[in-house]
Image: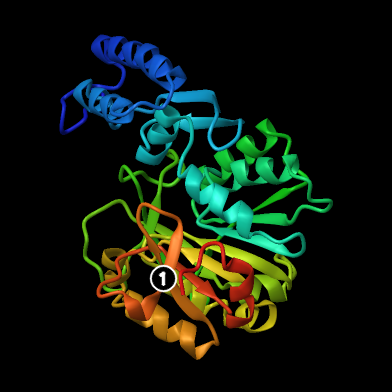
Amino acid sequence: MPARRDDRTGLAPGSTLSRVNTALYRLVGAILHRLPSVRGKVRLGLSLYKSLGLETHHIVVEAMLRRPVGHRMRLDLHSLSERMAYLDSGYDYEAVTFLARCLSQRGGFLDIGANIGLICIPLAVMLRASDIDHPASIYAIEAVRSNCQSLAHNIQLNGLDATVRVLCTGVGDRCRDVEIQVEGNLSDGQGTGTANILADGSNYACERIPLHITTVDNLIERGDLPADCRLIKIDVDGYDLKVLQGAAGLMARSRPLIYGEFLRHCLNWHGQSPGQVNEFALDHGYRTWVRTEPHWKFVPFERCRRVDKDLLLVPPEREVDLSWCLLA
């Protein structure tokens, strides 16, 4: 059988040219990875990867990422987020720093859509190095099997087995069967990457992976998650509100802070919007705040003419503790 070729480049993964290009990128990528953060280096690394025809190739590296704190990660560079983390020596590190400051000494942290640990692992390392006597437990919820395997490996790399627990499951508004697509249009088990749950009735042509999802409240009821949770991070590419709808019991009981991407165009895939997120928050005694870019400050939802992403849902009784980031 002939080697499978990349439809965009014609470069067969096992060919001599592919091996040469892979070796070249490993060399250049390692140099860029070690350079200080300078303008344009990530863009250069991404452009080179594409120009060498490696976008569908699985180049796996194990590297020490420096930002926001030193931590080791195994990364598959076919995934854009993992490639960016490698080139920039960290991924969304400002979010990690923000979440670490939000996290209280008691209760759990739920990382919903944990991927391979790009957020929860540096967060756990930061907490371990802090002066908190009893760091919060971290529960990493991830639906993609390959991601969970890499996540477990990265937890071991950093000696976090006692701190971070992995739940390989998807969550939403109810228990049901869905289909997901993994970045790179991968089949189940072919590799890591971001994933999204396909909308009901979607006829989008892609590699579909069947998945049974549950709810956060169900996971708590059966003892897989703690009843006391103080902070939730959600990044599930459009299913964010549905995750909240399945966590209403937790929200009523523990009153956690909730930070999520809530990307407008992804919510729209499921017929939802940031406005509906705000309505849900109000119905459950929360207030919605919107991040101001590029700063990590938040303004009330009602003061924004258009909201596209990055929401912080806060119980009013906890707003006083967040005066450092809420612009009333």
Front-most of 68 and 62? 68
> Does the image show residue 282?
yes
Question: Residue at coordinates 38% horizontally, 11% vertically from top-left?
Answer: 27
Front-most of 327 and 59? 327
Horizontal and vertical percent position of residue 276: 36, 82
Is residue 269 depicted above or below 158 in this figure? below
Residue that sits furthest to the right in the current view: 133
Horizontal and vertical percent position of residue 60: 46, 25
Task: Residue type at mark 1: give it.
Answer: Val
Instruction: Using residue 2 as the reference point, say whether residue 106 is left or right of it.
Output: right
Q: Quadrant of residue 249?
A: bottom right
Horizontal and vertical percent position of residue 325: 52, 63
Quarter of the image where the N terminus is located: top left
Front-most of 281 and 6? 281
Horizontal and vertical percent position of residue 127: 70, 46
Question: Residue at coordinates 62% horizontally, 74% vertically from top-left?
Answer: 320
Q: Quadrant of residue 158?
A: top right
Question: Residue at coordinates 73% horizontally, 73% vertically from top-left?
Answer: 227
Instruction: Using residue 316 as the reference point, say whether residue 133 is left or right of it.
Output: right
Q: Mark 1: give few (<14), some (14-19) or many (20+) Cα within 10 Å.
A: some
Identify the residue position indicated by label 1 in the image.
299
Is residue 85 depicted above or below 64 in this figure? below
Instruction: Using residue 121 as the reference point, say whether residue 4 is left or right of it.
Output: left
Secondary element at image label 1: strand
Q: Quadrant of residue 106?
A: bottom right
